[in-house]
């Protein structure tokens, strides 16, 4: 009995710590609704915390110790993380009470026949003292973080957007919890826009980005809600905006009127915002002046072509074909693609018609349909290059 028996129980629990952590979290999920919808990444984190808390409590029991400053700091950090996730504080505190009760049963079961009454009483004292101290630490960490999130919402929104742009957002579940906490409702497939002034001596400020959002009519929440549907952030002389899908012509005109240019990525899911941001930035860094011959905004197609021309490791020919040609790549439109190819090869509608042995009006009709389906005019230098690259990739086919 006493120390030898406690050490034996500690060794056995340590050997099966991962399994014990899983048992504890399964019990929490069965009893607390807020924990039933955890994402896989959140479950892994929760089991790791449960395993550590059990291991630490048993260690304190063996050596008649108490939670120290380092332990309490860790619990304060856990509380802050749960506030950022949007998990309700009562549910968090209850989860630890459920865990403590089941953990005590696990220890007693392991020590059956070896632990005496004093051992069990000592275990109870450790858990009571630990739950009291860790609950206070969790509460402090949670409330301070929640006050910061709610009290400085604009800063918290910038932090959220920054995390999305660099890929620090851990999981869809964590993002959903964080958005709910901040009253943000982001579209599943948003428009990601990076803008910069044409004059290299100027910069786009966050106030200027906010003015653009207001002009587009999306600065205010829908009637009856407080939820925002956009984010914006200044980065160097550029600004990055996450917008709900809207009218492209209005956006192009608004950007050009401000003396800006930019790159709009409108087909990347919210979870891939970091990749979309890098694609847009690379496009702005490498685009020649005449790439803006059709307006102030580059698009997904322009960005994918520039990535290919710059030999970026993420460049993929199928992305070029899909984003540049769109429905034009469908076999139903092979005659339109042939007409485009003839025009690109000859430089004129008349010569292209002669090459294909069709009437010039037929060829002009095909070119008009190309413009309608792709939004690109093959008479403009940059658009002609982009269309030609995409068409060549169709001819080459998959590797």
Image: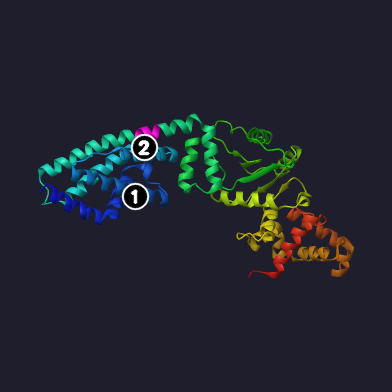
Residue occupying image coordinates x 52% and y 44%: 163
139 is within the stretch colored magenta: yes
Q: Main secondary structure of the magenta part?
A: helix
Identify residue for label 1.
48
Q: Are there few (<14), some (14-19), or many (20+) residues within 10 Å of tag 1? A: some
* Left or right position of 179 against 309: left
**Residue highlighted by disc 2:** 76
Image side of residue 107 versus residue 394, left or right:
left
Q: Is residue 243 visible?
A: no
Q: Which residues are magenta?
A: 138-143
184 w.r.t. 360: above or below: above
Horizontally, is 175 left or right of 52 in the view?
right
Camera-near label (2 vs 1) is 2
Residue 259 x/y as whole percent: 75, 39
Q: Locate residue 69: give its quadrant.
A: top left
**Mark 2 surroundings within 10 Å by alpha-carbon count, few (fewer than 14), some (14 through 19), many (20 or more):** many
Can residue 118 be seen in this snapshot?
yes
Which badge, 2 or 1, is on the more N-terminal residue?
1
Residue situated in front as seen by the camera: 72 or 27: 72
- Give me the C-alpha separation between circle 2 and circle 1: 16 Å
Q: Residue furthest top?
A: 151
**Residue 197 image position (x, y, % from top left):** 72, 41
Secondary element type, mark 2: helix
Disc 2 vs disc 1: Cβ atoms closer than 8 Å? Answer: no
Assign the C terminus to one quadrant of the image.
bottom right
Q: Is residue 132 magenta?
A: no
Residue 171 picture location, percent across and down: 47, 49
Q: Quadrant of residue 234?
A: top right
Q: Position of residue 321 (x, y in %)?
A: 68, 61
């Amino acid at each position: 009995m006493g120390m030898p028996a406690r050490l034996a129980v500690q060794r056995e629990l340590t050997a099966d710590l991962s399994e014990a952590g899983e048992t504890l979290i399964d019990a929490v999920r069965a009893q607390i609704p807020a924990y039933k919808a955890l994402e896989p990444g959140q479950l892994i984190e929760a089991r790791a915390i449960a395993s550590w808390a059990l291991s630490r409590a048993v260690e304190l029991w063996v050596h008649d110790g108490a939670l120290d400053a380092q332990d309490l700091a860790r619990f304060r950090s856990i509380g802050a993380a749960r506030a950022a996730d949007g998990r309700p504080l009562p549910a968090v505190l209850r989860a630890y009470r459920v865990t403590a009760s089941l953990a005590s049963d696990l220890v007693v079961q392991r020590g059956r026949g070896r632990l005496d009454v004093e051992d069990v009483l000592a275990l109870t004292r450790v858990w009571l003292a630990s739950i009291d101290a860790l609950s206070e630490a969790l509460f402090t960490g949670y409330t301070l973080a929640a006050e910061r999130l709610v009290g400085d919402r604009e800063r918290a929104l910038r932090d959220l957007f920054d995390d999305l742009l660099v890929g620090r957002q851990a999981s869809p579940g964590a993002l959903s919890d964080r958005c709910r906490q901040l009253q943000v409702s982001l579209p599943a497939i948003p428009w990601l826009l990076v803008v910069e002034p044409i004059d290299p001596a100027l910069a786009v400020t966050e106030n200027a980005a906010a003015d653009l959002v207001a002009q587009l009519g999306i600065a205010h929440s829908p009637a009856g809600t407080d939820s925002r549907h956009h984010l914006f952030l200044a980065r160097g002389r550029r600004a990055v905006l996450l917008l709900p899908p809207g009218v492209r012509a209005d956006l192009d005109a608004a950007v050009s009127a401000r003396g800006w240019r930019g790159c709009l990525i409108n087909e990347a899911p919210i979870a891939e915002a970091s990749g979309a941001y890098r694609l847009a930035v690379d496009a702005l860094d490498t685009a020649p002046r005449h790439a803006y011959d059709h307006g102030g905004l580059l698009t997904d197609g322009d960005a994918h072509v520039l990535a290919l021309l710059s030999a970026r490791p993420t460049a993929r020919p199928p992305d070029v074909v899909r984003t540049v040609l769109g429905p034009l790549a469908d076999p139903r439109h092979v005659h339109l693609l042939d007409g485009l190819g003839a025009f690109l090869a000859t430089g004129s509608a008349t010569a292209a018609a002669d090459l294909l042995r069709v009437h010039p009006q037929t060829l002009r009709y095909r070119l008009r349909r190309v413009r309608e389906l792709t939004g690109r005019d093959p008479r403009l230098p940059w658009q002609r290059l982009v269309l030609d690259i995409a068409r060549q990739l169709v001819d080459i086919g998959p590797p």
